[in-house]
Image (tube, rainbow, N blue to C red):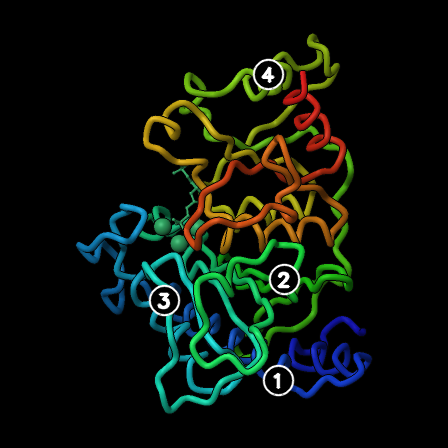
Amino acid sequence: MHIGTTLTNYIIETQRQIQGATGEFTGLLNDIAVACKKISDLVNKGDLIGVLGSAGSENVQGETQKKLDVITNEVFIEALAHNGHVAGLASEEMDEIYQLPADAPRGHYLVLFDPLDGSSNIDVNVSVGTIFSIIKAPPGVVQPTTEDFLKPGAEQCAAGYCLYGPSTMMVFATRDRGAQMFTLDKDFGEFLLTHENVQIPEDTAEFAINASNSRFWEAPVQRYVDECLAGSEGPRGKDFNMRWVASMVAEVHRILTRGGVFLYPLDEKLKTKGQGGKLRLMYEANPMSLIIEQAGGASTTGRERILTMRPEGIHQRVPVVLGSKNEVERIASYHLD
Ligand code: AHG
Ligand code: MN
Ligand code: MN
Ligand code: MN
């Protein structure tokens, strides 16, 4: 595919190679792109249109919602619920799965999404994003059940994210066709292919972790970070750099661009709160893991590959270690000792 082709063209072209493709998937991706363009515009205007700050409400995971958490969730529903491409939706910002209105046509897909990732960064004008995961709906379903959504990440048809940074970029991966990067041309109003078949370097000297949690870490994570910090004098024999944006989308984008490893491990503080991790399996860890693996990287909880986990709930939390393959495998091996 040539650089500069539109996202829609890219999907049409690749779908053409699949027997029996009906155009529904192309339509769905188009709906998602429309939602992301709207969100990009809202995030861009920010304070000018009064969308920053807290909404004063709480979501199902006990987080205080930002106004934009609520608004972006509505943007997604509006863009997807009436076009006949989905049979149901699930989101970080909705306690239960979303059932389509009775009169809306049903499609063959279910979409799970994090409408605004990194929302603690929104008020300080730092990059945020949107994450989405697409799975097949059971044939003919009108009112899908939560069970229908709880598929292992390896069964995702596609996953992607949109990064609202200095540029707005969409990264999209299917199960067997690699990861592609598109950049929004705002004058033109289209996402254009700017990087085809992204590949993550296997080795790295850059890691990302919220070090304020270090006193709560488990021994394998502590060991890994200690060895990085020891630099060229330590067992790794090289100096490491550290980055933490606090928007997973931005961290994953950096890793896709120049390699690195991202960790949000399980720690004692999370365990005390009864949580299995910080990040959510269905709309954060699974879609990002598909993208990372399609780009030649690896993704694990430390103890198991994320994409083969059996999900137990829409808002289930899991530990996440992802990025450059050799580094992720090293961290997983520390968990075996
Ligand atoms: P969200 O804003 O969708 O709730 O996700 C926030 C996540 C993720 O994007 C980021 O990596 C992490 O939370 C940041 O956590 P800390 O605030 O603990 O650094
Ligand atoms: Mn949140
Ligand atoms: Mn998030
Ligand atoms: Mn979010």
Q: Which of the two marks, 2 or 4, is nearer to us in this view?
A: 2
Label 1 crowd bin: few (<14), some (14–19), many (20+), radius 10 Å: some
Which residue is outermost to the top?
A: 233
Q: Nearer the viewer, residue 200 or 136?
A: 136
Which of labels 4 and 1 is toward the front?
1
Mark before the other along the chain sequence, 4 or 1: 1
Q: CA distance from mark 1 to mark 3?
A: 23 Å
Q: Are marks 1 and 3 in contact (CB under 8 Å)?
A: no
Report the residue at 66% width, 36% height from top: 260
Residue 197, by quadrant, is bottom right
Would you say the residues marked 2 and 1 are in contact, meaning their CB atoms lie under 8 Å apart? Answer: no
Which of the two discs, 3 and 4, labels the residue nearer the N terminus? 3
Q: Is residue 317 left or right of residue 228?
A: left
Q: Which residue is mark 3?
A: 72
Q: CA distance from mark 2 to mark 1?
A: 16 Å
Q: Inspect the image, locate mark 4, and give the three-letter code of the amino acid beneath it.
A: Leu
SS for tag 3? helix
Measured in 3D between alpha carbons, the distance from the residue under mark 4 to the one under mark 1, in whole angstroms, is 49 Å
Residue bearing the label numbered 2: 156
Residue at which label 1 appears = 24
- Secondary element under disc 1, as helix, strand or loop, is helix
Number of residues whose C-alpha sits closer than 10 Å to that of mark 4, classed few (under 14), some (14–19) or many (20 or more): some
Give the CA distance from mark 3 to mark 4: 39 Å
Q: Earlier in the sequence, mark 1 or mark 3?
A: 1
Position of 236 with respect to 33 (left or right) is right
Q: Earlier in the sequence, mark 2 or mark 3?
A: 3
**Residue 335 marker:** none
